[in-house]
Each structure stands twice: as C-alpha cells, then as structure tokens.
C-alpha cells in the first residue's frame, strides 16, 4: 500500500506497533493491530451495504469509536467520509448535505431526524440500530488501491462572506499533517495524546494520524469540560494535550484547584493562544504551549516547537512550505507591515485540492489564507486578524453572512449586520446591529430565540443593538468597522445578562 495514504499509514503502523495501544475512547481500547482489523472489517460492512469507492458517507456523530471506525473504514474502502458539525440543523444542515451530496449518512437518532426534516433522501444508518455498519457485522476486505491525491474526506469550513464550503482533503494531506505536527510537538511512541476537540474538525481528526506516525496512544473524550479537564488529563496519563485559543483563558480563569498539576502532560498544541497568557499558563499548569498556522485547506505551514518558541507568535515557516505577506494588490509588503498571508507547498498533496464545485488547485500554487499577519525580519510570523469578515468564537469560525441571513428571516427585521467584539475569554463574541421593519417592534430576546432555531448554539448572537439605520459606504456597503469601533454600549442587549463571559450550562 502507498504509505502516503491513510490505509497505507494504518497498515504500516499496525505492522510496526502491533499490540501497542492506539486508541482509547467511549470505553473502548484498541491496539494498532485491532485498529487495522477494524478498518478492514468496517470497510467490509460498508461494502455489504452498497458503499463503493468514491462514494461520500456523511456522519453526524459525536466523538465515539463508531466515528473513528467510519473514518478509517471509508479510507480503507476508498470512500470519502464527510464528518459534519453535530450542532448543524435547519438551513445550514440542508446546505452541507446538498453541497456534499452523500449517498449515505451515519447519525445518532436525533441527528438523523434533523437530516430527514431537512429533506435528506439518501440511506441513513442510525447509531445502535441493527442495520448500522460496525466492524463486527462483516468480514474484512482488501484495501482499495488509493492514490495520494484521491480525496479522503470532505471537511466543511465556515465561509467568511458566504455559505460554508466543503474542502476536498486528499489522502496524503492527512499523512503530511501527521508527520508535520508530530515533528513540531516532538512526539514519540512513549507519548499519550489527549483531545476533547470534535473529530469533524481538522485539529482532532489529525491527532489520530499524529499518533499513528510515531506509535503513540491517543485518548479521545466526547467534549470539553473546564471543571473536569485536568482530572481527565491525569486519568488518561496524557503527555500532550490539544487546546484551541479560547480554551486557554477559560481554563486559566477557573479558580485554582488541587490536582491541576497532578498530571504527566508537559506540552500542548494551542493555536491562537493570547501571548500574555503563555508564561502564566505554563507556570500554573506546567504546559508549554505550541502555536502555529494551519487551516483545513493547507497544513502546518508555520509553527514552532516546545523548545523554540516566542509567546504571541505563530512561528516560522516549516520545511517544505513557503509563506509571504502581501498587500491588496497581492505584491509582497516589507517585514513589519501587516498584510495577507499567502502560502504554498513543495510537498505533494500536502494541501487540499480545492472546494466542492470548483476546479482543482494547481500543485505548488500560492494559496490565499484570508489571515492578516506580520512577518518580523527574523522570519517569525504574528497573527493579527482575519482579512474578511469572520467571527472567531470558542474555537469556531462563524460566518457573519450566515448570522445575517438567519436574522433577515425574522418577519420584523429589515436589515442586519453581524460583527465581532472582544470577549473576556479571548477570541470574540458575536454582536449584531438590527434595523426593524417599519411599524414593527423588535425584542432582542425574541431575536436570540429565533437565531437559536436557525443556527448552531455557538453562532447565536450574544449582543444585540436595535438601530434606526446601518452605517453605509458611498457604494451602499455596511461599514462594519464603524460598528466594531462603537461596540457594546450601555443600551446594548446582552444575552448573558449581567454576568459577561459565561453561558448557561457551561461547565
């Protein structure tokens, strides 16, 4: 098997690491050999149900062994897995399913009903049902002869000015992710990796490949809990953890507690960590944080290591990749000048091949990232913000377009603008300015309830301003910079009430 494919990596890891533990999740422990067998038998179960190489199989599943089996089983069969955000419903779920066009959907019961309500007409397998594919329901099949450039997964990433887009991720991209991040984190076969991030995101999904690359263990929890985080790190005997930018201040904001350093972990991958928190976080929890730049469409292009870091910076360009900072005309700007980050790779199929419905990107071409950065003269890159209008909240990229579309569907809304404002927990909160229709009264709480029915919970606006008109440019575009500058005022409605930075039910 080609080692630059997921089945090739699974096979090589099983051959080399055999009876070493690979995976612990949802009460299940799997060795590397058992993981290869599960991938082959899951592929057989899928094939027995009519799935063929190239077919797309969507998933609406939480972090469970069944999702890992589906991901690896699809790769073994040559099918394309489409793991979807489990919070999607309504119009956003319909869009993702229509965009991906999966023949099959594997989901929990409630999620399956949401898909059916949205008009999905393909075959649905319900988690726990007798006809659901599992490694125990079929015999193993030989791996499909996949090529490094074959699509292994379609991952949806939030659009900044339009609907979410499905990214075609080739087989080799995942192998490169595993190699690059394992190298940056200095992982070895003696490590145990702990993640509670969702497997429908690049970050957690590629943790599996990092472990396979070096023969490490990976422990996967279903969700993040601030109150239980350090006890889980200790219980899993983790040596490396995975955090998103907002999780770092959330953990740091909790009252000191016994046991928060009673663990073996000493480093963690934590993109977008606020610079001022880097040293205090390490001092309190004993974790050296590693930053970097990598997106669903690219790879770990920029990064640093636990022993070579600079708080507040993403790092330097890694071997096999190139990066530059450009202005609006796409020509390079001098060091120290903010501009858009553009990247390219020499590694074959280390980047996604493009978006669904669009032509494949030429190999070796420069890719625009939409991130505003600064490059220091010594080659270190620092992130500033997004070039376009994206809101980053609790580790999720939120399209202002989607929030505005949901608001405009309210019968009393004439116009709306969504934009980011600062959060107490780093990253951003969602704020909206809304113009009521003539003769209509708007209740901000009612708007929030309306959005909750249309959007995932993380995208529901926290702050609402009812305004007479939106500030416009001469060409009729909303001047969101003016809205951001004004920000939260004394008359702004706050969904969280007087306690800012918390949400009902947060643990």
Image (cartoon, grey):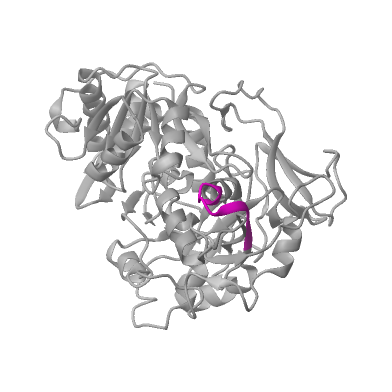
From the top left corner, tell me how far across and down residue 289 is, in percent: 54, 63
Give the camera-side residue of 404 and 28.
404
Q: Is residue 146 above or below residue 257?
A: above
Tell me where residue 36 sits by quadrant: top left
Residue at 28% x, 47% y is 23
Residue at 21% x, 20% y is 49
Say left or right for 238 vs 136: right
Q: Which residues are magenta?
A: 407-420
From the top left corner, tell me how far across and down residue 490 is, in percent: 63, 79
* Residue 4 visible in the shown view: no
From the top left corner, tell me how far across and down residue 127 is, in percent: 20, 39
Q: Is residue 319 above or below residue 484?
A: above
Which residue is situated farthest in the front direction here? 439
Does residue 109 show up magenta in the picture?
A: no
Give the camera-side residue of 135 and 304.
135
Residue at 67% x, 38% y is 321
Q: Give the quarter of the figure containing the C terminus.
A: bottom left
């Amino acid at each position: 098997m080609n080692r630059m494919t997921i089945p090739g990596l699974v096979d090589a890891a099983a051959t080399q690491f055999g009876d070493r533990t690979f995976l612990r999740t949802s009460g299940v422990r799997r060795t590397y050999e058992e993981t290869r067998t599960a991938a082959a038998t899951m592929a057989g179960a899928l094939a027995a149900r009519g799935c063929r190489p190239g077919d797309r199989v969507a998933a609406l599943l939480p972090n469970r062994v069944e999702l890992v089996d589906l991901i690896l089983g699809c790769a073994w069969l040559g099918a394309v897995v489409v793991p979807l955000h489990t919070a999607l419903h309504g119009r956003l779920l319909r869009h993702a399913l229509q965009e991906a066009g999966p023949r099959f959907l594997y989901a929990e019961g409630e999620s399956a009903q949401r898909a059916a309500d949205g008009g999905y007409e393909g075959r649905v397998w319900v988690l726990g049902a007798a006809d659901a594919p599992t490694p125990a329901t079929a015999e193993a099949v030989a791996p499909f002869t996949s090529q490094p450039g074959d699509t292994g997964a379609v991952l949806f990433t939030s659009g900044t000015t339009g609907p979410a887009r499905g990214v075609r991720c080739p087989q080799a991209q995942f192998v490169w992710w595993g190699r690059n991040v394992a190298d940056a984190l200095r992982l070895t076969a003696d490590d145990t990796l702990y993640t509670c991030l969702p497997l429908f995101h690049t970050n957690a999904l590629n943790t599996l490949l990092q472990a396979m690359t070096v023969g490490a263990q990976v422990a996967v929890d279903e969700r993040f809990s601030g109150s239980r985080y350090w006890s889980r790190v200790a219980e899993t005997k983790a040596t490396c953890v995975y955090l998103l930018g907002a999780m770092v201040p959330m953990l740091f904001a909790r009252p000191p507690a016994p046991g928060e350093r009673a663990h073996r972990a000493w480093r963690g991958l934590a993109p977008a960590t606020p610079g001022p928190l880097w040293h205090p976080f390490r001092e309190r929890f004993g974790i050296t944080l590693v930053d970097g730049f990598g997106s669903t469409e690219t790879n770990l292009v920029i990064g640093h290591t636990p022993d070579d870091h600079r708080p507040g910076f993403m790092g330097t360009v890694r071997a096999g990749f190139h990066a530059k900072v450009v202005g609006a005309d796409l020509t390079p700007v001098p060091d120290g000048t903010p501009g858009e980050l553009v990247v390219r790779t020499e590694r074959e199929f280390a980047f996604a091949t493009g978006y669904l419905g669009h032509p494949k990107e030429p190999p070796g071409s420069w890719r625009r990232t939409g991130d505003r950065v600064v490059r220091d003269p010594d080659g270190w890159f620092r992130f500033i913000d997004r070039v376009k209008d994206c809101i980053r909240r609790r580790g999720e990229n939120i399209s202002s377009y989607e929030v505005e579309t949901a608001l405009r569907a309210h019968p009393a809304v004439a116009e709306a603008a969504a934009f980011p404002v600062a959060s107490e927990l780093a990253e951003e909160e969602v704020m909206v300015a809304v113009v009521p229709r003539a003769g209509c009264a708007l209740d901000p709480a009612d708007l929030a309830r309306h959005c909750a029915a249309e959007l995932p919970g993380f995208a529901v606006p926290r702050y609402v301003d009812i305004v007479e008109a939106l500030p416009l440019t001469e060409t009729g575009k909303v001047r969101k910079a003016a809205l951001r500058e004004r920000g939260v005022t004394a008359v702004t409605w706050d969904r969280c009430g007087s306690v800012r930075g918390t949400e009902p039910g947060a643990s």
